[in-house]
Image (cartoon, rainbow, N blue to C red):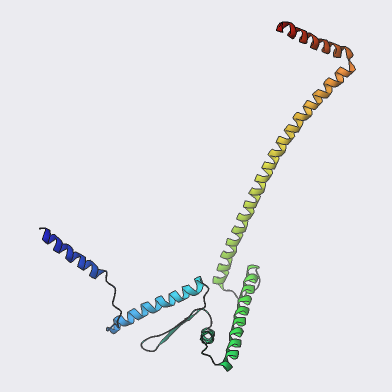
Amino acid sequence: MCRRRLVCLHILTKREKMGRGKVELKRIENPTNRQVTFSKRRNGLLKKAFELSVLCDAEVALIIFSPSGKAYQFSSHEIKRTITRYKIELGIAKTDEQGITSMEVWRNEIEELSRTIEALEAREKHFAGENLSGLGMKELKQLERQLRVGVERIRSKKRRIIMEHINYLKKKHKDLQEENSNLQKKLHELQEASTSSIILASDPTRAIQFGGLNNTNVVTKNISTV
């Protein structure tokens, strides 16, 4: 019985290892399967190249030739400029050509920056409601949505600032009330002290009586102590 269990476990383990085995990398003989695999892997590779250029701000150029000789490419910048830069980096370009290719790279960079600046300036004018004649319905709806989102963010920021200012004024008002209450209390004490001193100064008999009362209290306390 135990021997049968061991044999079964050995067979199951062998099957699991075979099921988890890696796919052997070799040429796919079936033309249909080969074309399907090429299309899937090509699209995945192009997608990864695009994601790398966007996420990491990298300059990426990718060229793929199919078995039939058809070319597929992706370039985050002008592909000719990237290839020229690659040649310069490896020292493949000739010395006479390096100056020209470097100027071409810089010229392309300047042109690209100029196009970016023009696009940003046009976008800024669109947000200001200017130069809208060249926009279609789709662009106008997108611009309206962006403006609506921007207005909501501005209003939210204004509300937050107003609430913070109101809370600050409330706290300041409370502090001023407490300070005013303390000052009124001190003023009342000073007024009482001033009134007592004026009464004693204007009526000497009260001062004598007050002094006699004090002496009587002192004598009484001494007798009680004896």
Q: Residue at x 19, y 64 (%)?
A: 12
User: Which residue is pictured at 61% across the width and 87% down the height?
Assistant: 103
Residue 12 horizontal side relative to residue 183, left or right: left
Q: Residue furthest bottom?
A: 96
Quarter of the figure with residue 172: top right
Q: Nearer the viewer, residue 154 or 98?
A: 98
Quadrant for the C terminus in the image? top right
Query: How many numbered marks appear?
Result: 0
Residue 152 vs residue 194, the one in the foreground: 194
Q: Report x, y in % for residue 208.
A: 86, 12
Looking at the picture, how far across and down is residue 149, in whole percent?
A: 57, 61
In the rendering, at what x and y percent does residue 195 appear? 83, 22
Expressed as whole percent of the image width and height from the top left, the position of residue 38 reads 35, 81
Return the residue nearer the eye: 137 or 106. 106
Q: Residue furthest front?
A: 226
Q: Residue furthest left?
A: 1
Q: Quadrant of residue 116?
A: bottom right
Residue in the picture at 15% in, 61% down = 6
Looking at the image, which residue is at 52% across and 75% down? Answer: 58
Q: Looking at the image, can residue 132 be seen?
A: no
User: In the rendered view, would you say 136 is above or below 163?
Assistant: below
* The N terminus - image quarter: bottom left
* Residue 37 image-quadrant placement: bottom left
Q: Is residue 101 left or right of residue 42?
A: right
Asked if residue 150 can be seen in this view, the reply is yes
